[in-house]
Amino acid sequence: MKTLTTSRPPALTNAAPPPSRRGRRPARATAVWILVGPYTLFLALFGLAPAGYALWTSFVDNGSFSGGRDWAAVFHDYRLGDAAAHVTTYLLLWLPILLLMVLSLAFTLHARPGRTTSTLQLVYYLPGAVTGSAAALLWLFMVSPDTSPFSPLLRLMDIESATDALSGGNLIAVLTVMGVAVHAGGWIVVLYGALNALPKDVLEAAQVDGASAWRTMWHVKLPMVRTYVAFVLISSFASGSQVFVEPTVLSTSAPGQISPTWSVNQLAYVYATQDGDFGKAAALSLAMLAVGVLAAWIVITRTHMYATHPSDSR
Protein backbone atom coordinates (compact mmCIF):
# COMPACT_ATOMS: atom_id res chain seq x y z
CA MET A 1 0.00 0.00 0.00
CA LYS A 2 1.41 3.29 -1.09
CA THR A 3 1.35 6.16 1.29
CA LEU A 4 0.79 9.63 0.01
CA THR A 5 3.16 12.24 1.31
CA THR A 6 2.25 15.83 1.10
CA SER A 7 5.00 18.22 0.22
CA ARG A 8 5.16 21.54 1.90
CA PRO A 9 4.84 24.42 -0.51
CA PRO A 10 7.95 26.53 -0.80
CA ALA A 11 8.06 29.47 1.47
CA LEU A 12 7.29 32.73 -0.19
CA THR A 13 10.17 35.16 -0.09
CA ASN A 14 9.54 38.83 -0.02
CA ALA A 15 10.89 40.40 -3.19
CA ALA A 16 12.98 43.47 -2.76
CA PRO A 17 10.88 46.55 -3.40
CA PRO A 18 11.80 48.49 -6.51
CA PRO A 19 13.77 51.63 -5.91
CA SER A 20 11.55 54.56 -5.27
CA ARG A 21 11.38 57.46 -7.64
CA ARG A 22 12.62 59.71 -4.89
CA GLY A 23 15.88 57.78 -4.81
CA ARG A 24 16.33 57.98 -8.56
CA ARG A 25 15.66 61.68 -8.90
CA PRO A 26 18.85 62.90 -7.16
CA ALA A 27 20.97 60.59 -9.32
CA ARG A 28 19.32 61.81 -12.51
CA ALA A 29 19.64 65.42 -11.41
CA THR A 30 23.33 64.91 -10.69
CA ALA A 31 23.88 63.38 -14.13
CA VAL A 32 22.04 66.26 -15.78
CA TRP A 33 24.18 68.85 -14.02
CA ILE A 34 27.37 66.98 -14.88
CA LEU A 35 26.44 67.17 -18.55
CA VAL A 36 24.92 70.65 -18.61
CA GLY A 37 27.10 72.34 -16.00
CA PRO A 38 30.26 72.88 -18.09
CA TYR A 39 28.26 74.24 -21.03
CA THR A 40 26.30 76.55 -18.74
CA LEU A 41 29.54 77.83 -17.22
CA PHE A 42 31.14 78.51 -20.60
CA LEU A 43 27.93 80.11 -21.87
CA ALA A 44 27.88 82.47 -18.91
CA LEU A 45 31.58 83.35 -19.10
CA PHE A 46 32.02 83.63 -22.86
CA GLY A 47 28.47 84.37 -24.04
CA LEU A 48 26.24 86.14 -21.55
CA ALA A 49 28.96 88.14 -19.80
CA PRO A 50 30.44 89.59 -23.03
CA ALA A 51 26.93 90.34 -24.31
CA GLY A 52 26.12 92.17 -21.08
CA TYR A 53 29.36 94.13 -21.27
CA ALA A 54 28.64 95.02 -24.92
CA LEU A 55 25.16 96.22 -23.94
CA TRP A 56 26.66 98.40 -21.22
CA THR A 57 29.31 99.76 -23.62
CA SER A 58 26.70 100.65 -26.23
CA PHE A 59 24.76 102.84 -23.77
CA VAL A 60 27.61 104.30 -21.70
CA ASP A 61 30.17 106.74 -23.11
CA ASN A 62 33.05 107.94 -20.92
CA GLY A 63 31.23 106.89 -17.79
CA SER A 64 27.97 108.67 -18.60
CA PHE A 65 24.75 107.42 -20.12
CA SER A 66 24.72 108.21 -23.84
CA GLY A 67 21.01 107.69 -24.37
CA GLY A 68 21.43 105.34 -27.30
CA ARG A 69 23.46 107.74 -29.47
CA ASP A 70 25.67 104.90 -30.66
CA TRP A 71 22.68 102.87 -31.78
CA ALA A 72 21.25 105.82 -33.70
CA ALA A 73 24.61 106.54 -35.33
CA VAL A 74 24.98 102.93 -36.45
CA PHE A 75 21.54 102.72 -38.04
CA HIS A 76 22.07 106.08 -39.80
CA ASP A 77 25.44 105.02 -41.24
CA TYR A 78 25.10 104.74 -45.02
CA ARG A 79 27.61 101.87 -45.05
CA LEU A 80 25.30 99.63 -43.01
CA GLY A 81 22.70 99.44 -45.78
CA ASP A 82 25.25 98.31 -48.36
CA ALA A 83 26.81 95.80 -45.97
CA ALA A 84 23.42 94.36 -45.00
CA ALA A 85 22.45 94.07 -48.68
CA HIS A 86 25.67 92.20 -49.46
CA VAL A 87 25.20 89.74 -46.59
CA THR A 88 21.52 89.21 -47.39
CA THR A 89 22.27 88.47 -51.04
CA TYR A 90 25.01 86.09 -50.00
CA LEU A 91 22.71 84.24 -47.59
CA LEU A 92 19.88 83.99 -50.13
CA LEU A 93 22.27 82.42 -52.62
CA TRP A 94 24.45 80.34 -50.32
CA LEU A 95 21.98 78.83 -47.82
CA PRO A 96 19.63 77.12 -50.34
CA ILE A 97 22.55 75.68 -52.32
CA LEU A 98 24.22 74.45 -49.14
CA LEU A 99 21.07 72.79 -47.77
CA LEU A 100 20.23 71.21 -51.12
CA MET A 101 23.71 69.76 -51.50
CA VAL A 102 23.90 68.51 -47.91
CA LEU A 103 20.48 66.85 -48.03
CA SER A 104 20.91 65.30 -51.48
CA LEU A 105 24.37 63.86 -50.84
CA ALA A 106 23.55 62.62 -47.32
CA PHE A 107 20.36 60.88 -48.48
CA THR A 108 22.19 59.42 -51.48
CA LEU A 109 24.93 57.97 -49.27
CA HIS A 110 22.34 56.49 -46.93
CA ALA A 111 20.23 55.02 -49.73
CA ARG A 112 23.20 53.30 -51.39
CA PRO A 113 25.52 52.03 -48.64
CA GLY A 114 28.66 50.26 -49.72
CA ARG A 115 32.40 50.12 -49.44
CA THR A 116 32.83 53.55 -50.97
CA THR A 117 30.57 55.29 -48.45
CA SER A 118 33.34 55.87 -45.89
CA THR A 119 35.69 57.07 -48.61
CA LEU A 120 33.12 59.51 -49.94
CA GLN A 121 32.47 60.86 -46.44
CA LEU A 122 36.19 61.58 -46.10
CA VAL A 123 36.28 63.23 -49.52
CA TYR A 124 33.31 65.43 -48.64
CA TYR A 125 34.77 66.34 -45.26
CA LEU A 126 38.31 67.24 -46.38
CA PRO A 127 37.48 70.73 -47.74
CA GLY A 128 35.98 71.63 -44.38
CA ALA A 129 39.12 70.58 -42.50
CA VAL A 130 40.78 73.90 -43.35
CA THR A 131 40.00 77.23 -41.72
CA GLY A 132 38.26 80.09 -43.47
CA SER A 133 41.49 82.04 -43.99
CA ALA A 134 43.27 79.03 -45.49
CA ALA A 135 40.30 78.32 -47.74
CA ALA A 136 40.30 81.95 -48.90
CA LEU A 137 43.99 81.72 -49.79
CA LEU A 138 43.34 78.47 -51.64
CA TRP A 139 40.54 80.04 -53.64
CA LEU A 140 42.75 82.99 -54.52
CA PHE A 141 44.83 80.55 -56.54
CA MET A 142 41.70 78.89 -57.93
CA VAL A 143 40.25 82.12 -59.35
CA SER A 144 43.52 83.50 -60.68
CA PRO A 145 44.03 82.46 -64.34
CA ASP A 146 47.81 82.41 -63.88
CA THR A 147 47.73 79.67 -61.23
CA SER A 148 44.28 78.07 -61.48
CA PRO A 149 43.82 74.62 -63.04
CA PHE A 150 40.64 76.06 -64.55
CA SER A 151 42.45 78.89 -66.34
CA PRO A 152 41.02 77.99 -69.81
CA LEU A 153 37.50 78.24 -68.40
CA LEU A 154 38.29 81.51 -66.63
CA ARG A 155 39.77 83.05 -69.76
CA LEU A 156 36.73 81.90 -71.70
CA MET A 157 34.68 83.98 -69.27
CA ASP A 158 36.93 87.03 -69.95
CA ILE A 159 38.60 86.73 -66.55
CA GLU A 160 42.26 87.65 -66.99
CA SER A 161 43.23 88.22 -63.36
CA ALA A 162 42.06 87.70 -59.79
CA THR A 163 40.82 91.28 -59.81
CA ASP A 164 38.44 90.47 -62.65
CA ALA A 165 37.22 87.35 -60.82
CA LEU A 166 36.42 89.31 -57.65
CA SER A 167 34.97 92.45 -59.18
CA GLY A 168 31.31 93.38 -59.25
CA GLY A 169 28.85 90.58 -58.57
CA ASN A 170 31.51 87.90 -59.06
CA LEU A 171 32.58 88.22 -55.42
CA ILE A 172 29.30 86.84 -54.08
CA ALA A 173 29.51 83.92 -56.52
CA VAL A 174 33.07 83.15 -55.39
CA LEU A 175 32.07 83.40 -51.72
CA THR A 176 29.11 81.09 -52.36
CA VAL A 177 31.23 78.40 -53.99
CA MET A 178 33.83 78.76 -51.26
CA GLY A 179 31.25 78.57 -48.48
CA VAL A 180 29.58 75.47 -49.92
CA ALA A 181 32.93 73.72 -50.36
CA VAL A 182 34.04 74.51 -46.81
CA HIS A 183 30.82 73.88 -44.88
CA ALA A 184 28.96 71.17 -46.80
CA GLY A 185 31.25 68.24 -45.96
CA GLY A 186 30.93 68.44 -42.20
CA TRP A 187 27.15 68.74 -42.32
CA ILE A 188 26.93 65.78 -44.73
CA VAL A 189 28.74 63.62 -42.17
CA VAL A 190 26.46 64.85 -39.35
CA LEU A 191 23.26 64.24 -41.31
CA TYR A 192 24.47 60.85 -42.52
CA GLY A 193 25.07 59.83 -38.92
CA ALA A 194 21.54 60.92 -38.03
CA LEU A 195 20.13 58.85 -40.90
CA ASN A 196 22.05 55.78 -39.73
CA ALA A 197 20.40 56.13 -36.31
CA LEU A 198 16.87 55.83 -37.75
CA PRO A 199 14.93 52.72 -36.66
CA LYS A 200 15.40 49.95 -39.20
CA ASP A 201 11.89 48.59 -38.67
CA VAL A 202 10.35 51.90 -39.76
CA LEU A 203 12.34 51.94 -43.00
CA GLU A 204 11.53 48.27 -43.64
CA ALA A 205 7.84 48.95 -43.05
CA ALA A 206 7.97 51.69 -45.67
CA GLN A 207 9.50 49.26 -48.15
CA VAL A 208 6.87 46.62 -47.37
CA ASP A 209 4.13 49.19 -47.98
CA GLY A 210 5.59 49.79 -51.43
CA ALA A 211 7.01 53.26 -50.84
CA SER A 212 9.52 54.35 -53.45
CA ALA A 213 12.95 55.68 -52.52
CA TRP A 214 11.75 59.24 -53.11
CA ARG A 215 8.62 58.82 -50.93
CA THR A 216 10.66 57.12 -48.22
CA MET A 217 13.10 59.99 -48.20
CA TRP A 218 10.46 62.75 -48.30
CA HIS A 219 7.77 61.29 -46.02
CA VAL A 220 9.78 59.07 -43.65
CA LYS A 221 13.44 60.00 -43.39
CA LEU A 222 13.22 63.77 -43.68
CA PRO A 223 10.56 64.26 -40.96
CA MET A 224 12.55 62.03 -38.61
CA VAL A 225 15.74 64.08 -39.01
CA ARG A 226 14.07 67.48 -39.11
CA THR A 227 15.78 68.53 -35.87
CA TYR A 228 19.19 67.98 -37.45
CA VAL A 229 18.15 69.91 -40.56
CA ALA A 230 16.95 72.76 -38.35
CA PHE A 231 20.27 72.72 -36.50
CA VAL A 232 22.16 72.88 -39.81
CA LEU A 233 20.02 75.82 -40.91
CA ILE A 234 20.48 77.76 -37.65
CA SER A 235 24.24 77.21 -37.49
CA SER A 236 24.72 78.00 -41.17
CA PHE A 237 22.69 81.20 -40.92
CA ALA A 238 24.76 82.34 -37.94
CA SER A 239 27.99 81.57 -39.79
CA GLY A 240 26.92 83.21 -43.04
CA SER A 241 25.55 86.36 -41.45
CA GLN A 242 28.90 86.91 -39.71
CA VAL A 243 31.05 86.43 -42.81
CA PHE A 244 34.32 88.27 -42.24
CA VAL A 245 37.51 86.33 -42.96
CA GLU A 246 36.80 85.43 -46.59
CA PRO A 247 36.13 88.93 -47.99
CA THR A 248 38.95 90.35 -45.87
CA VAL A 249 41.52 87.90 -47.25
CA LEU A 250 40.22 88.11 -50.82
CA SER A 251 40.43 91.91 -50.75
CA THR A 252 44.23 91.68 -50.50
CA SER A 253 44.46 90.40 -54.08
CA ALA A 254 41.93 92.86 -55.53
CA PRO A 255 42.80 96.32 -54.21
CA GLY A 256 39.92 98.74 -54.55
CA GLN A 257 37.45 96.06 -55.65
CA ILE A 258 36.24 94.89 -52.22
CA SER A 259 35.23 97.48 -49.65
CA PRO A 260 36.70 97.10 -46.15
CA THR A 261 33.09 97.38 -44.91
CA TRP A 262 31.67 94.86 -47.40
CA SER A 263 29.97 92.81 -44.66
CA VAL A 264 28.26 93.85 -41.43
CA ASN A 265 30.94 92.14 -39.36
CA GLN A 266 33.64 94.04 -41.24
CA LEU A 267 31.86 97.30 -40.49
CA ALA A 268 31.85 96.46 -36.78
CA TYR A 269 35.57 95.70 -37.05
CA VAL A 270 36.20 99.11 -38.65
CA TYR A 271 34.26 100.80 -35.85
CA ALA A 272 36.42 99.14 -33.20
CA THR A 273 39.89 99.19 -34.79
CA GLN A 274 40.05 102.14 -37.18
CA ASP A 275 37.53 104.53 -35.62
CA GLY A 276 38.20 103.46 -32.02
CA ASP A 277 34.46 103.67 -31.34
CA PHE A 278 33.68 100.63 -29.22
CA GLY A 279 30.17 101.85 -28.51
CA LYS A 280 29.18 101.62 -32.17
CA ALA A 281 30.96 98.29 -32.54
CA ALA A 282 29.09 96.91 -29.52
CA ALA A 283 25.75 98.22 -30.77
CA LEU A 284 26.21 96.69 -34.21
CA SER A 285 27.37 93.38 -32.72
CA LEU A 286 24.28 93.21 -30.51
CA ALA A 287 22.07 93.99 -33.51
CA MET A 288 23.64 91.06 -35.35
CA LEU A 289 23.07 88.89 -32.28
CA ALA A 290 19.40 89.92 -32.19
CA VAL A 291 18.97 89.00 -35.87
CA GLY A 292 20.57 85.60 -35.26
CA VAL A 293 18.39 84.89 -32.22
CA LEU A 294 15.26 85.93 -34.12
CA ALA A 295 16.16 83.67 -37.05
CA ALA A 296 16.84 80.77 -34.69
CA TRP A 297 13.51 81.32 -32.92
CA ILE A 298 11.65 81.29 -36.25
CA VAL A 299 13.33 78.05 -37.34
CA ILE A 300 12.73 76.36 -33.97
CA THR A 301 9.06 77.30 -33.84
CA ARG A 302 8.33 76.53 -37.49
CA THR A 303 10.07 73.14 -37.46
CA HIS A 304 8.99 72.18 -33.90
CA MET A 305 12.62 71.40 -33.21
CA TYR A 306 12.10 70.54 -29.54
CA ALA A 307 8.83 68.64 -29.90
CA THR A 308 8.85 65.59 -27.61
CA HIS A 309 5.58 64.04 -28.81
CA PRO A 310 4.47 63.31 -32.38
CA SER A 311 1.35 65.43 -31.92
CA ASP A 312 3.52 68.43 -30.98
CA SER A 313 5.11 68.54 -34.43
CA ARG A 314 1.86 68.83 -36.35
Image (cartoon, rainbow, N blue to C red):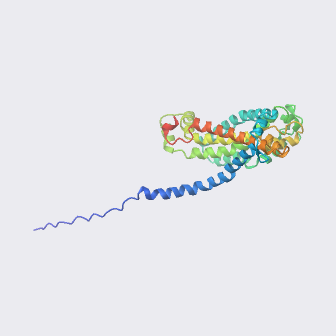
The residue lying toward the viewer, choosing from 64 and 68, is 64
Residue 214 or residue 267, whichever sits in front: 267
Residue 173 appears in the figure = no
Q: Residue visible at 65% across and 49% down? A: 118
> Which residue is found at the position 55% from the left and 47% from the top?
197
Of the 4 image quadrants, the one containing the N terminus is bottom left
Give the percent coordinates (x, y) of residue 158.
87, 31
Residue 77 percent coordinates (x, y): 80, 34
Residue 152 or residue 254, whichever sits in front = 254
| Residue 293 x/y as whole percent | 65, 40
Q: Is residue 215 left or right of residue 283?
A: left
Where on the picture, by quarter, is residue 55? top right
| Left/right of residue 239 with respect to residue 40 in the rendered view | right
- Looking at the image, which residue is at 65% across and 43% down? 188
Is 18 placed above or below 202 here? below
How many numbered callouts? 0
Residue farthest left in this picture: 1
Report whether 42 appears left or right of 10: right
The front one of 263 and 178 is 263
Residue 238 rendering spot, x and y as whole percentages: 69, 41
Q: Is residue 171 visible?
A: yes
- Does residue 75 lie above or below 269 as drawn? above
